[in-house]
Amino acid sequence: MVVLCLLPFVLLALVLTSAVAVPAWLVLGALALCFAVMLFVSREPPGTGVGPHASVEVVQEGRGSERGVPEDLILRTVDVIYPLAQYRLEDHYVIEGTLLMEPDAAFAELGRRFEGSALTPLLQETGEGRPRLVLAPAAALPSPVQRRGWAWLNLVLLLATLATTTWAGAAHRGVDLLAEPGRFAEGLPYALALLLILGAHELGHYVTARRHGIAVSLPYFIPIPFALGTFGAFIKMKSLAADRRQMFDVAVAGPLAGLVIAIPALLIGLQDSTVVTGPAAPGMMMGGADVGSSVLFAVLAKAALGGAVLEGHRLVLHPVAFAGWLGLLVTALNLIPVGQLDGGHLVHALLGHRMARVVGLAALGALVVLGLFVWSGLLVWALLIVLVAGTTDVPPLNDVSRVGPGRVALGAVAFAVLLLILLPVPHALYDAFGIHSPYL
């Protein structure tokens, strides 16, 4: 799968380095073929799905147990799920069939029946949408680590990230802290604003996970002594979500909490940002930004600066505004519906495991096409997503119950935010936004 995911990038490299002109339709067709092959290879065969690399031994069709699931397990579950197919998947017992009660009630009943046993019940769906009960050894599932005293590591990483982001914030203002350490306050506005945004994002995940009884670590910040000063932060999930509703809540809480800090930071910082009348603003790494580069950013810039943006199309962002702008970017990248990104968890919770993989591969394809024809930097993000977040995520214990209309509506809002952050303002709408573009 990794090789297949890299094929579009190999194709792109050949096109860019070739002296022969290649028609755009041919490039798009080849990319479409790559992703079609990925879809075919990654499709879930009937009766599989507990693990991406597991081998399946189909033992028996029907209700008997001579070569399949032991009789005592059949008797313990037969009035919850009517078995139509039974087989072993390594050390897992799998029963496919028809649920005889509502998914939530079925999962709760199975939990009671297997409480204290060596097996943990999981409700999943096959590729055809048929319910599947997986009885997995408890030792094979993620479980909380019963070890304390490691909070010092989180604190050390936080302090290190505060130092590196302070250095980066000062560098963005032209101050070299190695030569002038006494001017460290120059970098604090950027550092504190960015850490608040990243911290709010991760604490949104953390608090929601704890509220649902999911074991989770404190946030780990990632310091780097160059560029932005950090690669962000993450938390470690130490146990599985009980159902799609919990998965959805934990996933959506991070981006929403981050936006609660990022948007006010951007609005406040924009008050002290500088509008320039030509394309002479510094690049992104030095706080330069196009007003029309994002629909949401354009709306916020107009709200903060009003008619000032009529005089120019580019801004030199104040460090606090730059941190808020990065907060929008981090939110958008996390909401891309791929693998173990927040967006991947959301689309899984909304549409199910199989459709989530299809949507994820389609999103990666869109990133490659946009990277090819709009901004080449998206190709790097697509590759990083494949290597870090993968194309699939870990399902909850109950992957059958639906999330409900309220969460569907909130999920639609989250993905609308993704589009508002990533999509630039169409040139035809610049007048409607009241933004002057020197490029028109």
Image (cartoon, grey):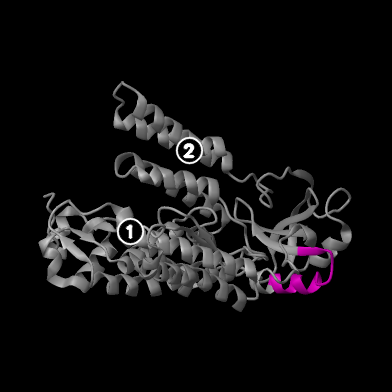
Residue segment shown in magenta: 106-120
Between residue 437 and residue 157, name the one nearer to us.
157
The percent coordinates of residue 146 (x first, y second) are 76, 69
Q: Relative to 133, is 439 on the left or the right?
A: left
Residue where numbered disc 1 is placed:
172
Residue type at tag 1: His
Magenta stretch: includes residue 107:
yes
Q: Tell which residue pokes out farthest to the bottom in this image.
A: 211
Asked if residue 384 is positioned above or below residue 10 in the image, the reply reads below
Whether residue 127 is situated above or below residue 164 in the rendered picture: above
Q: Residue at x 32, y 66 (%)?
A: 319
Count of marks placed on residues: 2
**Residue 306 belongs to magenta span:** no
Q: Which mark is residue 210?
A: none
Of 324 and 440, the residue lying toward us? 324
Element class at badge 1: helix
Q: Position of residue 379 (x, y in %)?
A: 40, 43
Q: In the image, what residue type sits under mark 2?
A: Ala
Question: Within 10 angstroms of label 1, few (less than 14), some, or many (20 or more) residues?
Answer: many
In the picture, measured across the screen, residue 228 lies left or right of residue 394, that is left
How far, Cα to Cα, is label 2 from label 1? Answer: 44 Å
Q: Residue at x 88, y 62 (%)?
A: 72
Name the spot of residue 181 as percent of width and height, x first.
Answer: 41, 64
Residue at image coords 44%, 67%: 411
The residue tagged 2 is: 36
Q: The N terminus appears in which quarter of the rendering? A: top right
